[in-house]
Image (cartoon, grey):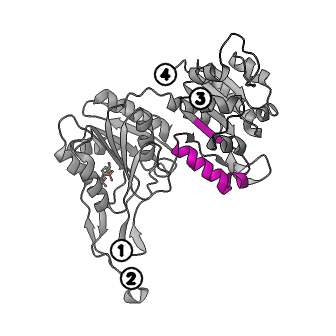
Amino acid sequence: MKGLNKNILLGITGGIAAYKMVEVASRLTKLGHSVHVVMTEGGRQFVTPLTFQNITLNPVETDLFTPPRHYEVKHISLADRAEICLIAPATANFIGKLANGIADDLLTTIIMASKAPVLLAPSMNVNMFDNPIVQENLTYLREKGYEVLEPGTGYLACGYEGKGRLPEPAELVEYLLRHLTVKDFSGKRVLISAGPTREPFDPVRFLTNYSSGKMGYALARAAAYRGAEVKLISGPTDLNPPLGVETIYVKRALEMKEAVDCLADEQDIIIMAAAVADFRPANPQKDKIKKSSHKQEHTEIKLLPNPDILAELGKRKRPGQFLVGFAAESRNLSENARDKLRKKNLDMIIANDISNPRLGFASEENQVLIMTASSSNQLPQLKKLKLADIILDNILHYQ
Ligand code: CTP
């Protein structure tokens, strides 16, 4: 993986999830990073500094005023050295101090003095996490440029069920690695569409599909981490907008087309991951359609074809622009993908077989074939986040 041997500061505050950080420190050290652990007094109640010292092979710092080993202003030198800081678990107390500019121990002074990106991983009881004061502090810190990782939901050490779990070590490591990712998409403008479209019959009913938007959002997130200027045009989904991505929300295919058309010309790369509905009701009603108005056994609904946004992008593609489409197929994957690649004038197509019910739509994983005019690469089953990176690697390679 790109970008090894980074200087990573792990700040550990007083939450039971501090034990998970032993594995985080271990994984990062094994990957070749230089890991420096700073523990608050609360953090030291849960895990000893010695544990981290032995794992990271670096001294663990705990106190602002202990004399340094060689002369340096400790909090400044630690702040300057760090290329990224992860505070995990971040307690309500730590979050409150940071949001209010209080720097009364080693960790708060380091974070205040650091110019490196700071990731906060809140972990606490669900009611504490939901407390409006904590939420307002987190919102404020986000506005100030701190990245706040969503806590997981599930069984909490306090006996409650709910939101407040520290993400698992593998996930925390993933976040850090993504931040440390080489910005090989910097200067590139990327437009991505995601999710389904909704084609209304009347104000309460619509035609749609099972797309969750996960693949398109994963691509947007990964491209942004890699330094691209990303615009995401999203149909209705339950997903949070990816950080650092300008997200434009649409519902109908015609709205998606309008948004895409507006932005297409200025893009270097366009990826149409949206599952655009191919048809829309011909006569959407202003008022709710009443049961009583359809007494006969069969009711017919007239549909009109929607424009194929991708095919039209293929027609107006400017020189140097790289156009990527998706293909959801239930049979003849490779032939159908090649056919769409050619007919829609695409540079790349990502084809997946939708006959496997555990993969594709709404699932966390997918298995795809990446095809260009001169290549065909069948990938194994992968998490969509991982897949997004591989698709981007391929785009860079063939662009
Ligand atoms: N697409 C689009 N506009 C549409 C339909 C699809 O831009 N009205 C795009 C999708 O975003 C995707 C690609 O076309 O990138 C392929 O969609 P898919 O549904 O697999 O194929 P279709 O071209 O619609 O063909 P068919 O449904 O017949 O397989």
Q: Where is residue 362 in the image (x, y as percent from the top left)?
A: 49, 52
For marks 2 and 3, give the CA distance: 62 Å
Magenta stretch in the rendered image:
119-145
Residue at image location 46% in from the left, 51% down from the top:
361
Q: Is residue 128 magenta?
A: yes
Marking on residue 3:
4
Residue positioned most to the right: 45
The residue to which callout 2 is attached is 289
Marking on residue 113:
3
| Mark 4 residue type | Gly
Query: Helix, strand or loop at disc 3?
Result: helix
Of residue 130 and residue 374, the one placed in the foreground of this image is: 130
Dots 3 and 1: beta carbons under 8 Å?
no
Residue at image location 62% in from the left, 48% down from the top:
137
The residue to which callout 1 is attached is 201
Badge 2 or badge 3: first in the primary sequence: 3
